[in-house]
Amino acid sequence: MERFLGRVSPILQLTRVTTAFAAVANVWFVILWSSRVAEEAPIPHLDSKPMWALLLGGAASALGLYSYGTCLNDLLDVRRDRALRPERPLASGRVSIETAAVTVALTLIIAILGATVFGTASVLLTLALAVGILFFNTAARFVPAVGLVALGLLYAGHIMVPNPGLRFMWPVWLVMTHALVVAAATHVLARKVPPISTRAAFLAALGWVAWSGLILWLGWARSAPLEGTTRAVWPSWVPLTAAIGPAMLGVGFIVLAIRRTRQYGFGPRAADKIYRYGSLWLTLYAVAWMLGAGFFLEAAVLGGLALVAFFTMTTLRELYGLAEQPVGYRR
């Protein structure tokens, strides 16, 4: 068992599967929402396929693209990690450069194959996101004013893969905002370089405002799908109660982040906690949107995914520890 864990755990750490469930939750939310809400129709690629095929394709697309980004990040950072984070799979030599390169290629292929379930537009969006991930990892993340906004946009684009013509854009805006806030918080707590200066923070906030306006304008422009309906920032066919749960969760996450920062202090440990909770929170947002709209079956599906994510995160972290420090007998 220990031998098996020793072989598998580096790959699992390289692909960050414990936090990839957030990407799956985002994609599944759009699939279930688009299939359930009549005003989001017609969507031929969603209507003509069974739900199990859509969810399977969405999971493959989400996991593939997320793992592509994390593997690419580690591959490009291997020299830096050898000096600063020698415990990482590539830096420690537990995963070879060749294996990481193959994993990057395979995960991108899986993401594209998963997107084919939703049609050509989704495949093109996936390829655009792959290019965006490459840009982020090679250049944008070294300029906080650009990198923070770019990361938020990557999350926003990823949620739309199953339905690039999504009409209810508030969940997209929330995902972008949450990802940007979590990235900024972990950057500051972990004392990453370069630090976020006042100028960089202002430019990032300005970028967030500009893209928020564009996303919400797009939602307004798409909000009148039926003849006789009028455009509105909040679509008339979505109950206002749908916003209550996500808003409460947003406030709850801020409170949780403050408490964890006070508990662990500034440093990598607090940053890691907030990053992991932030990933899990995206699955909770998806559940809250469904509950607020009165779609209880869909909320149960996403709630089950959230439970699986929490259980997997907890279990794999224990297994990582077991693989790296096997239990032995004391004399």
Image (cartoon, helix red, strand yellow):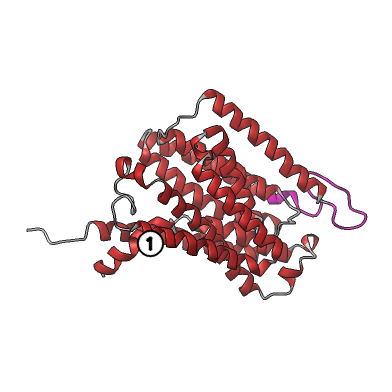
Q: Evaluate whether residue 12 shows in this view.
A: no
Q: Residue at position x 33%, y 50% from top? A: 88
Horizontally, residue 181 falls left or right of residue 239, namely left
Q: Residue at position x 29%, y 69% from top? A: 4
Total labels: the figure holds 1
Residue 13 percent across, percent down from the top left: 38, 56
Q: Nearer the viewer, residue 9 or 141?
A: 141
Q: Residue at position x 56%, y 28% from top? A: 201
Which residue lies under the disc numbered 1? 99
Amino acid type of disc 1?
A: Thr
- The image quarter containing residue 322 is bottom left
Residue 81 percent across, percent down from the top left: 34, 44
- Considering only vertical position in the picture, is 150 above or below 288? above
| Label 1 CA crowd tier, 10 Å (few <14, some 14–19, many 20+) | few
Horizontally, residue 265 falls left or right of residue 126, namely left
- Residue at the top extreme, as displayed: 198
- Residue at the front extreme, as displayed: 98
Circle 1: element type: helix
Q: Residue at position x 34%, y 61% from top? A: 9
- Considering only vertical position in the picture, is 215 above or below 293? above
Horizontally, residue 191 falls left or right of residue 287, namely left
Q: Evaluate whether residue 74 shows in this view.
A: yes
Horizontally, residue 315 falls left or right of residue 289, namely left
Q: Nearer the viewer, residue 6 or 240?
A: 6
Residue 288 percent across, percent down from the top left: 62, 54
In the image, the segment drawn in magenta is 224-242
For the N terminus, give its image quadrant.
bottom left
Question: Was residue 237 drawn as part of the magenta stretch in this picture?
Answer: yes
- The image quarter containing residue 325 is bottom left
- Considering only vertical position in the picture, is 233 above or below 266? below
